[in-house]
Image (tube, helix red, strand yellow):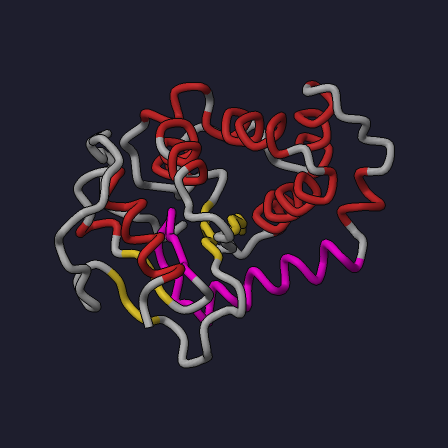
Amino acid sequence: MIKHIALALTLAVAPLSSFAAQFIEGKHFTTVSNKAPSAEPKLTEFYSFYCHNCFNMETQYLADIKANLKPGVSFDSKHVDFMNSDIGTEVMRSLAVIQELKAQDKMIHAMFTAIQGEAGAHGHSHDHDHSAHEKPEINTRDDIKKVFSDQGIDVSDYDKIADSQAVTDKINLWRAQQSEFKVQSVPTFIVNDKYAVNLGAIRTLGELIDLINYLAVEHK
């Protein structure tokens, strides 16, 4: 079973503005690494294509978050490995392949939809034990390749890319950082490889963006 965030993401879409409230460590964010922050400011989202709230974040909030990051703050996304199964690894690899192909605009939503259906972004179930549900359509690498092909992506080199050292190194890094940053629910936002945002303490989209920018460029 995938451990999954119990929080329903219902951030109010308030006007984006600077919040006067002081962000408090232990309430709004936690330090998850003893290492120094990354040399360059960055935001990393850990998520899963199987996660309803991740689909919700992708479709409703993420574009605004990325558009309102302060100059110089980069964005990256990484797939968690909560399933610890062959198909779980293949789905992780699919995101790495998408990134290698720079096909995020076409393929991120397509993979969410292939696994969850169009209603996935608005689903409320937090049980990812597939034995309790209908058999998912994505069961093999060939199923994933069909999703790519249906989106007009040439899959003739898919296996070569998916099995490449670059992709293997990438998913090994994702697993290592998932452990290092104590990622136990998704979506999780990690700032500067050091701070985890506590989504449960955030009430508006503007507040979330302000917190991310604060941790990325101001917090010392």
Where is residue 136? Give x, y as percent. Answer: 52, 31
Which of the 4 image quadrants contains residue 59?
A: top left
Residue at 81% from the left image edge and 27% from the top image edge: 154
Nearer to the camera, 170 or 89: 170
**On the picture, is 159 further left or further right than 83?**
right
Residue at 61% from the left image edge and 45% from the top image edge: 87
Q: How many marks?
A: 0
**On the picture, is 50 further left or further right than 61?**
right
Which of the 4 image quadrants contains residue 16?
A: top left
Relative to 55, is 152 above or below?
A: above
**On the picture, is 143 further left or further right than 128?**
right
Where is residue 107? Give x, y as percent. Answer: 62, 29
Residue at 36% from the left image edge and 59% from the top image edge: 184
**On the picture, is 2 further left or further right than 100?**
left
Which of the 4 image quadrants contains residue 218?
A: bottom left
Nearer to the camera, 191 or 178: 191
Whether residue 60 is in magenta: the answer is no
Which quadrant: the C terminus? Answer: bottom left
- Taking the view exactly as shown, the residue that stands out farthest to the bottom is 34
Where is residue 58? Give x, y as percent. Answer: 43, 33
Whether residue 169 is in magenta: the answer is yes
Where is residue 205? Give x, y as percent. Answer: 26, 38
For the magenta stretch, what is the residue range?
A: 165-191
Relative to 185, is 38 above or below?
A: below
Nearer to the camera, 116 or 137: 116
